Amino acid sequence: MTETIDFFSGFGANDLWFLAEAALRTLWISILSIAAGTFLGALCGWLIYEGKIWATLTLTPVLDIFRSVPLIIQLVLFYNFAPIVGLNLDPFASGVVILTIYTAALVANVARGGIEAVGRPMRRAARSLGMSYWQDMRYVVLPIGGRAIFPSWIGVALGVMKDSALVSVLGYVELLKASQILITRTQEPFLILSIAGAFYFALSFPISRYAAKLEERWAQ
């Protein structure tokens, strides 16, 4: 008698755990990229604001390229051409590098806008009180400009977290890639994508709510 082999099986508890682990990978790659990209973007924004000619001529075109070229193209090009220059990076490292640069390109304009939000008269007043340039940046520009750009930065952070799904094209098993794997095996796309969407919501909603609470506190 010939036995029939069933290649597909239903969605189970192990599959839910598999998605949960993938969600943690999504969170991890997002945290690293957003943290590094925010620091790098703030530095670039400051350099552009200060009007250094060399920074304006070199940084602005490069940042415009990373803002304009679709992220998926950046990921694929970097992952395939990095070995040519001797960088043998795995999908996770490649994703972090490109997401960091992409985040920095977005944050640079946000940071520059935050510095510009602090009026020149206020900064001159700080200097007239005896503050150094760096004291002015720390005690005047950072608190005021930081509050002004905080909603925009939250938007960038949430966008990068969702865009991290594109790292799946490199083979990194984050939430979207894990969903694709399970859909192929279980043939239950609606259920799996609904669960994946719930995981994305669980990652994003606390951040947006906490940001809203901070804004309300600052408005008081």
Image (cartoon, rainbow, N blue to C red):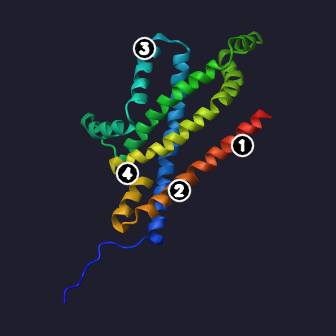
Q: Amino acid at mark 2?
A: Phe
Q: Residue at x 66, y 41 (%)?
A: 211
Q: Amino acid at mark 3?
A: Leu
Mark 3 or mark 2: whose residue is earlier in sequence = 3
Q: Residue at x 63, y 34 (%)?
A: 151
Mark 3 or mark 4: whose residue is earlier in sequence = 3
Q: Which mark is residue 172?
A: 4
For mark 1, what is the residue?
Answer: 213
Numbered disc 1: secondary structure: helix
Q: Which mark is residue 57?
A: 3
Q: Nearer the viewer, residue 188 or 68?
A: 188
State yes or no: discs 4 and 1 in contact (Cβ < 8 Å).
no
State yes or no: discs 3 and 2 in contact (Cβ < 8 Å).
no
The span from disc 1 to disc 2 (Cα, nearest Å) is 22 Å
Q: Residues within 10 Å of mark 3 (few under 14, many from 20)?
A: few
Q: Amino acid at mark 4?
A: Tyr
The span from disc 3 to disc 4 (Cα, nearest Å) is 35 Å
Q: Nearer the viewer, residue 53 or 4?
A: 4
* Whole-percent x, y for residue 136 in the image: 69, 18
For mark 2, what is the residue?
Answer: 199
Numbered disc 2: secondary structure: helix
State yes or no: discs 3 and 1 in contact (Cβ < 8 Å).
no
Q: Does residue 69 lie above or below 12 as drawn?
A: above
The span from disc 3 to disc 2 (Cα, nearest Å) is 42 Å
Mark 3 or mark 1: whose residue is earlier in sequence = 3
* Res 84 → quadrant: top left
* Whole-percent x, y for residue 208 in the image: 63, 44
Numbered disc 4: secondary structure: loop
Q: Does residue 218 lie above or below 127 as drawn?
A: below
Mark 4 or mark 1: whose residue is earlier in sequence = 4
**Residue 174 visible in the snapshot:** no
The span from disc 3 to disc 1 (Cα, nearest Å) is 39 Å
